[in-house]
Image (cartoon, rainbow, N blue to C red):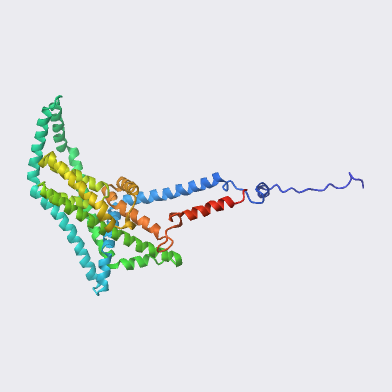
Amino acid sequence: MGLFSSAPKTVRVDTSATALRVAAGGGKPWSLWSDGLGVLAIRALQIMIVVAIAAAIIVGIQQVTVVTIPLVLALIFASAFAPVMTWLRRHGVPSLVATLMALLAILVILGAVSWLIVWAVRDQWDTLSAQAEAGLQDLLAWGRTLPFDIDHDQIDEWIAQLQSFVTSPQFGSRAIAGVSAVANFVTGLVLMVVMLFFFLKDGPQMWAFLLRPFRGDNYERAVRIGDKTVQTLGSYVRGTATVAAVDAVGILIGLLILQVPLAIPLAVLVFLLAFIPIVGATLAGILAALVALVANGWVIALLVVGVVVLVNQLEGNLLQPVLMGRSMKLHPFVVLVALTIGTVLSGIAGAVLAVPITAVAWGIVQVWDGPHTPARWARPKHREDAAATRARIADAPVA
Protein backbone atom coordinates (compact mmCIF):
# COMPACT_ATOMS: atom_id res chain seq x y z
CA MET A 1 0.00 0.00 0.00
CA GLY A 2 1.23 3.49 -0.75
CA LEU A 3 1.98 6.18 1.63
CA PHE A 4 -1.25 7.96 0.98
CA SER A 5 -3.25 4.79 1.02
CA SER A 6 -2.47 3.95 4.70
CA ALA A 7 -5.11 4.65 7.33
CA PRO A 8 -4.64 8.10 8.92
CA LYS A 9 -3.61 8.22 12.56
CA THR A 10 -6.03 9.81 14.98
CA VAL A 11 -4.38 12.35 17.27
CA ARG A 12 -6.37 12.79 20.44
CA VAL A 13 -6.14 16.24 21.92
CA ASP A 14 -7.53 16.65 25.43
CA THR A 15 -9.54 19.81 25.24
CA SER A 16 -11.19 19.39 28.63
CA ALA A 17 -11.38 22.38 30.94
CA THR A 18 -9.16 20.70 33.52
CA ALA A 19 -6.37 20.08 31.02
CA LEU A 20 -6.52 23.65 29.75
CA ARG A 21 -6.33 24.98 33.28
CA VAL A 22 -3.38 22.74 34.09
CA ALA A 23 -1.57 23.86 30.94
CA ALA A 24 -2.30 27.51 31.58
CA GLY A 25 -1.35 27.36 35.23
CA GLY A 26 1.97 25.62 34.90
CA GLY A 27 0.73 22.35 36.36
CA LYS A 28 -1.62 23.91 38.93
CA PRO A 29 -5.40 24.12 38.41
CA TRP A 30 -6.38 27.68 37.69
CA SER A 31 -9.47 29.21 39.22
CA LEU A 32 -11.16 32.55 39.11
CA TRP A 33 -11.05 32.57 42.92
CA SER A 34 -7.30 32.01 43.27
CA ASP A 35 -6.03 35.38 42.09
CA GLY A 36 -5.97 38.58 44.13
CA LEU A 37 -9.38 39.76 42.99
CA GLY A 38 -10.92 36.38 43.77
CA VAL A 39 -9.46 36.37 47.29
CA LEU A 40 -10.77 39.91 47.80
CA ALA A 41 -14.23 38.80 46.65
CA ILE A 42 -14.20 35.85 49.06
CA ARG A 43 -13.17 38.08 51.96
CA ALA A 44 -15.85 40.63 51.04
CA LEU A 45 -18.48 37.88 50.95
CA GLN A 46 -17.33 36.58 54.33
CA ILE A 47 -17.49 40.09 55.82
CA MET A 48 -20.98 40.62 54.41
CA ILE A 49 -22.18 37.34 55.96
CA VAL A 50 -20.66 38.20 59.34
CA VAL A 51 -22.17 41.70 59.27
CA ALA A 52 -25.57 40.31 58.29
CA ILE A 53 -25.50 37.79 61.16
CA ALA A 54 -24.39 40.49 63.62
CA ALA A 55 -27.15 42.83 62.41
CA ALA A 56 -29.75 40.07 62.79
CA ILE A 57 -28.55 39.38 66.34
CA ILE A 58 -28.66 43.09 67.24
CA VAL A 59 -32.17 43.50 65.80
CA GLY A 60 -33.31 40.43 67.70
CA ILE A 61 -31.83 41.76 70.94
CA GLN A 62 -33.53 45.12 70.43
CA GLN A 63 -36.90 43.39 70.11
CA VAL A 64 -36.55 41.77 73.55
CA THR A 65 -34.69 44.44 75.52
CA VAL A 66 -37.06 43.81 78.43
CA VAL A 67 -35.23 40.46 78.76
CA THR A 68 -31.73 41.14 77.45
CA ILE A 69 -30.95 44.27 79.49
CA PRO A 70 -32.02 42.70 82.83
CA LEU A 71 -30.02 39.61 81.86
CA VAL A 72 -26.83 41.61 81.27
CA LEU A 73 -27.34 43.71 84.41
CA ALA A 74 -27.92 40.58 86.49
CA LEU A 75 -24.73 39.06 85.08
CA ILE A 76 -22.79 42.23 85.91
CA PHE A 77 -24.07 42.38 89.50
CA ALA A 78 -23.41 38.65 89.96
CA SER A 79 -19.86 39.10 88.67
CA ALA A 80 -19.30 42.03 91.04
CA PHE A 81 -20.41 39.92 94.03
CA ALA A 82 -18.67 36.72 92.87
CA PRO A 83 -15.74 37.13 95.34
CA VAL A 84 -18.22 37.62 98.19
CA MET A 85 -20.14 34.48 97.22
CA THR A 86 -16.90 32.50 96.94
CA TRP A 87 -15.77 33.68 100.37
CA LEU A 88 -19.11 32.83 101.97
CA ARG A 89 -19.21 29.35 100.44
CA ARG A 90 -15.60 28.72 101.44
CA HIS A 91 -16.49 29.49 105.06
CA GLY A 92 -19.33 27.00 105.13
CA VAL A 93 -22.30 29.30 104.53
CA PRO A 94 -25.06 27.41 102.68
CA SER A 95 -25.54 28.48 99.07
CA LEU A 96 -29.13 29.64 99.58
CA VAL A 97 -28.25 31.71 102.66
CA ALA A 98 -25.23 33.27 100.92
CA THR A 99 -27.40 34.11 97.90
CA LEU A 100 -30.06 35.76 100.01
CA MET A 101 -27.43 37.79 101.90
CA ALA A 102 -25.81 39.06 98.69
CA LEU A 103 -29.15 39.76 97.04
CA LEU A 104 -30.38 41.64 100.08
CA ALA A 105 -27.20 43.74 100.13
CA ILE A 106 -27.66 44.66 96.46
CA LEU A 107 -31.33 45.61 96.94
CA VAL A 108 -30.51 47.66 100.05
CA ILE A 109 -27.83 49.60 98.16
CA LEU A 110 -30.11 50.29 95.18
CA GLY A 111 -33.05 51.21 97.44
CA ALA A 112 -30.93 53.53 99.58
CA VAL A 113 -29.65 55.39 96.52
CA SER A 114 -33.18 55.80 95.11
CA TRP A 115 -34.63 56.92 98.45
CA LEU A 116 -31.80 59.41 98.97
CA ILE A 117 -32.47 61.07 95.62
CA VAL A 118 -36.25 61.27 96.14
CA TRP A 119 -35.94 62.56 99.71
CA ALA A 120 -33.40 65.25 98.89
CA VAL A 121 -35.31 66.48 95.84
CA ARG A 122 -38.63 66.67 97.74
CA ASP A 123 -36.94 68.42 100.65
CA GLN A 124 -35.38 71.20 98.56
CA TRP A 125 -37.63 71.32 95.48
CA ASP A 126 -39.76 74.26 96.64
CA THR A 127 -36.71 76.37 97.40
CA LEU A 128 -35.05 75.52 94.12
CA SER A 129 -38.19 76.17 92.04
CA ALA A 130 -38.64 79.58 93.69
CA GLN A 131 -35.00 80.42 93.01
CA ALA A 132 -35.35 79.22 89.42
CA GLU A 133 -38.39 81.43 88.89
CA ALA A 134 -36.57 84.41 90.39
CA GLY A 135 -33.56 83.65 88.20
CA LEU A 136 -35.76 83.56 85.10
CA GLN A 137 -37.27 86.94 85.99
CA ASP A 138 -33.77 88.36 86.52
CA LEU A 139 -32.72 86.98 83.15
CA LEU A 140 -35.70 88.62 81.44
CA ALA A 141 -35.00 91.91 83.23
CA TRP A 142 -31.38 91.74 82.15
CA GLY A 143 -32.52 91.12 78.58
CA ARG A 144 -34.43 94.41 78.61
CA THR A 145 -31.22 96.30 79.38
CA LEU A 146 -29.39 95.02 76.31
CA PRO A 147 -28.55 97.55 73.56
CA PHE A 148 -30.64 95.63 71.01
CA ASP A 149 -34.34 94.95 71.24
CA ILE A 150 -35.78 91.58 72.22
CA ASP A 151 -39.27 90.79 71.08
CA HIS A 152 -41.01 90.10 74.39
CA ASP A 153 -44.26 89.33 72.57
CA GLN A 154 -42.46 86.46 70.85
CA ILE A 155 -41.23 85.17 74.22
CA ASP A 156 -44.76 85.32 75.61
CA GLU A 157 -46.01 83.46 72.56
CA TRP A 158 -43.42 80.71 73.11
CA ILE A 159 -44.52 80.38 76.75
CA ALA A 160 -48.16 80.18 75.67
CA GLN A 161 -47.31 77.50 73.12
CA LEU A 162 -45.52 75.52 75.82
CA GLN A 163 -48.52 75.77 78.11
CA SER A 164 -50.90 74.70 75.35
CA PHE A 165 -48.65 71.73 74.54
CA VAL A 166 -48.70 70.60 78.18
CA THR A 167 -52.52 70.62 78.13
CA SER A 168 -52.84 69.10 74.64
CA PRO A 169 -53.83 65.47 73.82
CA GLN A 170 -50.40 64.96 72.28
CA PHE A 171 -48.77 65.56 75.68
CA GLY A 172 -51.28 63.18 77.22
CA SER A 173 -50.37 60.44 74.74
CA ARG A 174 -46.73 60.94 75.59
CA ALA A 175 -47.60 60.74 79.26
CA ILE A 176 -49.32 57.42 78.57
CA ALA A 177 -46.19 56.27 76.76
CA GLY A 178 -44.23 57.31 79.85
CA VAL A 179 -46.52 55.18 82.01
CA SER A 180 -45.85 52.25 79.67
CA ALA A 181 -42.12 52.86 79.99
CA VAL A 182 -42.45 52.82 83.78
CA ALA A 183 -44.33 49.52 83.57
CA ASN A 184 -41.57 48.06 81.38
CA PHE A 185 -38.99 49.33 83.86
CA VAL A 186 -40.75 47.64 86.78
CA THR A 187 -41.05 44.42 84.79
CA GLY A 188 -37.38 44.51 83.89
CA LEU A 189 -36.42 45.25 87.50
CA VAL A 190 -38.36 42.25 88.81
CA LEU A 191 -36.91 40.05 86.08
CA MET A 192 -33.40 41.25 86.89
CA VAL A 193 -33.84 40.42 90.58
CA VAL A 194 -35.04 36.90 89.72
CA MET A 195 -32.17 36.33 87.27
CA LEU A 196 -29.69 37.72 89.77
CA PHE A 197 -30.94 35.29 92.39
CA PHE A 198 -30.29 32.30 90.12
CA PHE A 199 -26.92 33.65 88.93
CA LEU A 200 -25.75 34.07 92.51
CA LYS A 201 -27.09 30.71 93.68
CA ASP A 202 -26.45 28.42 90.70
CA GLY A 203 -24.05 30.41 88.50
CA PRO A 204 -21.19 27.84 88.51
CA GLN A 205 -23.59 24.95 87.81
CA MET A 206 -25.27 26.86 84.97
CA TRP A 207 -21.91 27.63 83.38
CA ALA A 208 -20.79 24.01 83.73
CA PHE A 209 -23.97 22.92 81.95
CA LEU A 210 -23.26 25.29 79.05
CA LEU A 211 -19.72 23.88 78.74
CA ARG A 212 -20.87 20.28 78.20
CA PRO A 213 -20.70 20.33 74.36
CA PHE A 214 -17.03 21.44 74.38
CA ARG A 215 -14.05 19.05 74.36
CA GLY A 216 -10.29 19.34 74.56
CA ASP A 217 -8.77 22.69 73.62
CA ASN A 218 -12.20 24.19 72.94
CA TYR A 219 -13.27 23.30 76.48
CA GLU A 220 -10.16 24.91 77.98
CA ARG A 221 -10.76 28.02 75.88
CA ALA A 222 -14.41 28.22 76.96
CA VAL A 223 -13.36 27.93 80.61
CA ARG A 224 -10.86 30.76 80.16
CA ILE A 225 -13.51 32.91 78.46
CA GLY A 226 -15.98 32.38 81.31
CA ASP A 227 -13.41 33.14 84.00
CA LYS A 228 -12.18 36.22 82.15
CA THR A 229 -15.73 37.51 81.63
CA VAL A 230 -16.60 37.25 85.32
CA GLN A 231 -13.25 38.75 86.34
CA THR A 232 -13.52 41.66 83.89
CA LEU A 233 -17.11 42.55 84.72
CA GLY A 234 -16.50 42.28 88.47
CA SER A 235 -13.32 44.37 88.35
CA TYR A 236 -14.99 46.98 86.17
CA VAL A 237 -18.05 47.37 88.41
CA ARG A 238 -16.11 47.38 91.69
CA GLY A 239 -13.46 49.77 90.39
CA THR A 240 -15.95 52.11 88.75
CA ALA A 241 -18.17 52.13 91.85
CA THR A 242 -15.20 53.00 94.08
CA VAL A 243 -14.05 55.79 91.78
CA ALA A 244 -17.62 57.08 91.46
CA ALA A 245 -18.06 57.10 95.25
CA VAL A 246 -14.87 59.12 95.72
CA ASP A 247 -15.97 61.56 93.00
CA ALA A 248 -19.42 61.93 94.57
CA VAL A 249 -17.98 62.59 98.05
CA GLY A 250 -15.50 65.14 96.72
CA ILE A 251 -18.11 67.04 94.74
CA LEU A 252 -20.58 66.81 97.64
CA ILE A 253 -18.07 68.47 99.97
CA GLY A 254 -17.49 71.23 97.43
CA LEU A 255 -21.22 71.82 96.90
CA LEU A 256 -21.88 71.92 100.65
CA ILE A 257 -19.07 74.43 101.20
CA LEU A 258 -20.44 76.62 98.40
CA GLN A 259 -23.99 76.18 99.79
CA VAL A 260 -25.44 74.94 96.52
CA PRO A 261 -28.98 73.50 96.91
CA LEU A 262 -29.71 69.88 96.01
CA ALA A 263 -26.13 68.98 96.91
CA ILE A 264 -27.01 65.40 97.90
CA PRO A 265 -29.04 64.58 94.74
CA LEU A 266 -26.30 66.11 92.60
CA ALA A 267 -23.68 63.99 94.38
CA VAL A 268 -25.77 60.86 93.84
CA LEU A 269 -26.17 61.84 90.20
CA VAL A 270 -22.40 62.20 89.93
CA PHE A 271 -22.07 58.67 91.30
CA LEU A 272 -24.55 57.25 88.77
CA LEU A 273 -23.20 59.14 85.76
CA ALA A 274 -19.67 57.98 86.55
CA PHE A 275 -20.66 54.63 85.04
CA ILE A 276 -20.79 56.40 81.65
CA PRO A 277 -17.10 57.21 80.94
CA ILE A 278 -16.12 60.59 79.48
CA VAL A 279 -19.71 61.78 78.93
CA GLY A 280 -20.96 61.14 82.48
CA ALA A 281 -18.52 63.46 84.21
CA THR A 282 -19.30 66.22 81.72
CA LEU A 283 -23.06 65.90 82.21
CA ALA A 284 -22.69 65.87 85.99
CA GLY A 285 -20.57 69.03 85.91
CA ILE A 286 -23.03 70.83 83.62
CA LEU A 287 -26.02 69.98 85.84
CA ALA A 288 -24.21 71.04 89.02
CA ALA A 289 -23.14 74.30 87.40
CA LEU A 290 -26.67 75.02 86.15
CA VAL A 291 -28.15 74.50 89.62
CA ALA A 292 -25.51 76.77 91.11
CA LEU A 293 -26.13 79.38 88.41
CA VAL A 294 -29.86 79.44 89.11
CA ALA A 295 -29.56 79.39 92.87
CA ASN A 296 -26.28 81.16 93.68
CA GLY A 297 -25.19 83.21 90.68
CA TRP A 298 -22.48 82.92 88.08
CA VAL A 299 -19.53 83.28 90.48
CA ILE A 300 -20.54 80.20 92.50
CA ALA A 301 -21.31 78.40 89.24
CA LEU A 302 -17.75 78.99 88.05
CA LEU A 303 -16.42 77.73 91.39
CA VAL A 304 -18.56 74.60 91.02
CA VAL A 305 -17.08 74.02 87.57
CA GLY A 306 -13.62 74.35 89.11
CA VAL A 307 -14.47 71.81 91.82
CA VAL A 308 -15.79 69.33 89.24
CA VAL A 309 -12.71 69.70 87.03
CA LEU A 310 -10.36 69.29 90.02
CA VAL A 311 -12.11 66.14 91.25
CA ASN A 312 -12.17 64.64 87.75
CA GLN A 313 -8.46 65.32 87.28
CA LEU A 314 -7.61 63.63 90.58
CA GLU A 315 -9.80 60.69 89.66
CA GLY A 316 -8.37 60.28 86.16
CA ASN A 317 -4.72 60.62 87.13
CA LEU A 318 -4.63 58.91 90.54
CA LEU A 319 -7.65 56.74 91.31
CA GLN A 320 -8.36 55.00 88.01
CA PRO A 321 -4.79 53.75 87.36
CA VAL A 322 -4.66 52.30 90.90
CA LEU A 323 -8.18 50.89 91.24
CA MET A 324 -8.95 49.86 87.67
CA GLY A 325 -5.52 48.60 86.64
CA ARG A 326 -3.96 48.55 83.20
CA SER A 327 -5.86 45.39 82.25
CA MET A 328 -9.12 47.37 82.30
CA LYS A 329 -7.75 50.41 80.53
CA LEU A 330 -9.21 50.96 77.07
CA HIS A 331 -8.06 53.65 74.68
CA PRO A 332 -10.29 56.75 74.86
CA PHE A 333 -11.04 56.41 71.14
CA VAL A 334 -12.33 52.86 71.69
CA VAL A 335 -14.41 54.05 74.67
CA LEU A 336 -15.90 56.89 72.61
CA VAL A 337 -16.79 54.60 69.70
CA ALA A 338 -18.31 52.03 72.08
CA LEU A 339 -20.36 54.74 73.83
CA THR A 340 -21.64 56.07 70.51
CA ILE A 341 -22.66 52.64 69.23
CA GLY A 342 -24.26 51.67 72.53
CA THR A 343 -26.20 54.93 72.76
CA VAL A 344 -27.47 54.65 69.18
CA LEU A 345 -28.59 51.05 69.67
CA SER A 346 -30.08 51.14 73.20
CA GLY A 347 -30.07 54.71 74.53
CA ILE A 348 -28.96 55.25 78.12
CA ALA A 349 -28.82 51.52 78.86
CA GLY A 350 -26.55 51.03 75.87
CA ALA A 351 -24.29 53.87 77.01
CA VAL A 352 -23.94 52.27 80.45
CA LEU A 353 -23.33 48.73 79.15
CA ALA A 354 -21.19 49.54 76.10
CA VAL A 355 -17.86 49.96 77.90
CA PRO A 356 -18.00 46.85 80.13
CA ILE A 357 -19.09 44.73 77.16
CA THR A 358 -16.20 46.13 75.11
CA ALA A 359 -13.81 45.43 78.00
CA VAL A 360 -15.09 41.84 78.15
CA ALA A 361 -14.58 41.40 74.40
CA TRP A 362 -11.01 42.66 74.65
CA GLY A 363 -10.38 40.47 77.70
CA ILE A 364 -11.55 37.41 75.76
CA VAL A 365 -9.11 38.26 72.98
CA GLN A 366 -6.32 38.43 75.58
CA VAL A 367 -6.88 34.80 76.70
CA TRP A 368 -7.93 33.25 73.40
CA ASP A 369 -4.83 31.08 72.88
CA GLY A 370 -3.83 30.61 76.53
CA PRO A 371 -4.13 32.02 80.06
CA HIS A 372 -1.63 34.76 79.14
CA THR A 373 -1.56 34.37 75.35
CA PRO A 374 -3.72 36.68 73.21
CA ALA A 375 -5.11 35.70 69.85
CA ARG A 376 -2.45 35.58 67.16
CA TRP A 377 -3.62 38.71 65.37
CA ALA A 378 -3.68 40.68 68.66
CA ARG A 379 -0.15 39.85 69.77
CA PRO A 380 2.32 42.76 69.82
CA LYS A 381 4.85 42.76 67.01
CA HIS A 382 8.44 43.17 68.21
CA ARG A 383 11.20 44.68 66.13
CA GLU A 384 12.99 41.34 65.97
CA ASP A 385 9.90 39.70 64.50
CA ALA A 386 9.50 42.50 61.97
CA ALA A 387 13.17 42.19 60.97
CA ALA A 388 12.83 38.42 60.55
CA THR A 389 9.74 38.91 58.40
CA ARG A 390 11.56 41.40 56.17
CA ALA A 391 14.50 38.99 55.86
CA ARG A 392 12.21 36.13 54.80
CA ILE A 393 10.57 38.35 52.22
CA ALA A 394 13.98 39.45 50.88
CA ASP A 395 15.24 35.85 50.65
CA ALA A 396 12.10 34.54 49.01
CA PRO A 397 12.60 33.50 45.35
CA VAL A 398 11.11 35.77 42.75
CA ALA A 399 8.38 34.04 40.76
| Residue 266: x %, y % from top left | 16, 49
| Left or right: 261 in relation to 224 | left
Q: Is residue 192 above or below residue 149?
A: below
Residue at 11% x, 33% y: name it: 139
| Residue 268: x %, y % from top left | 17, 52
Between 396 and 79, the one nearer to me in the picture: 396
| Residue 382: x %, y % from top left | 46, 55
Q: Is residue 224 above or below residue 355?
A: below
Q: How many marks?
A: 0
Which residue appears farthest toward the right when viewing the image?
A: 1
| Left or right: 179 in relation to 353 | left
Between 253 and 180, the one nearer to me in the picture: 253
| Left or right: 13 in relation to 155 | right
**Where is residue 172, by image quadrant?**
top left
Q: Is residue 90 visible?
A: yes
Q: Is residue 75 visible?
A: no
Residue at 34% x, 58% y: name it: 327
| Residue 235: x %, y % from top left | 29, 60
**Where is residue 240, by image quadrant?**
bottom left
Which residue appears farthest toward the bottom when viewing the image?
A: 92
Between 135 and 330, the one nearer to me in the picture: 330
